[in-house]
């Protein structure tokens, strides 16, 4: 079970890091203040309730490196548990 959790977290970090490499910025909308009709209405302004997030230059590389290390660590977990049971 631990192996699958670490593997999932590592893959997720790699994917988010790769996405951060591709995007320049992301617009985050406040769910409490934004209605769906403001996106469909051409006269509406959904950007009034948004925040722009720009990832730092080192963030994608940090996430991908941490994800890769976590995935590699998850593949060594079964050997670690077997050694502990044998001792």
Image: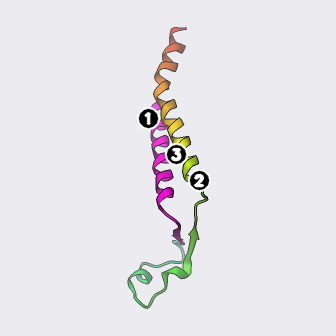
Where residue 33 appears, as percent x and y from the top left, is: 54, 77
Where residue 66 appears, as percent x and y from the top left, is: 56, 41
Judged by depth in the image, the label closer to the viewer, 3 or 1, is 3
Question: Could you say whether the residue bearing mark 3 is in a helix, strand or loop?
Answer: helix
Do labels 2 and 3 touch, CB within 8 Å? no
Residue shown at 58%/47% (left/top)?
Answer: 62
Residue 87 is covered by the magenta coloring: no
Quadrant showing the N terminus = top left
Q: Is residue 36 placed above or below 59 in the rendered structure?
A: below
Q: Residues within 10 Å of mark 2 (few under 14, many from 20)?
A: some
Q: Is residue 44 placed above or below 11 in the rendered structure?
A: below
- C-alpha span from label 3 to label 1: 18 Å
Quadrant showing the C terminus = top right
Question: Could you say whether the residue bearing mark 1 is in a helix, strand or loop?
Answer: helix
In which quadrant of the rendered view does residue 36 lie? bottom left
Q: Would you name the residue on which mark 1 appears?
A: 4
Q: Would you name the residue on which mark 3 appears?
A: 64
Residue shown at 46%/56% (left/top)?
Answer: 19
Residue shown at 50%/47% (left/top)?
Answer: 13
């Amino acid at each position: 079970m631990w192996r699958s959790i670490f593997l999932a977290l590592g893959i997720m970090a790699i994917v988010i890091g790769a996405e951060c490499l591709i995007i320049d910025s992301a617009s985050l909308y406040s769910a409490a203040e934004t209605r769906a009709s403001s996106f469909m209405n051409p006269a509406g302004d959904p950007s009034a309730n948004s925040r722009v997030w720009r990832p730092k230059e080192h963030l994608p590389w940090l996430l991908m490196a941490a994800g890769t290390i976590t995935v590699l660590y998850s593949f060594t977990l079964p050997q670690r548990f077997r050694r502990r049971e044998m001792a």
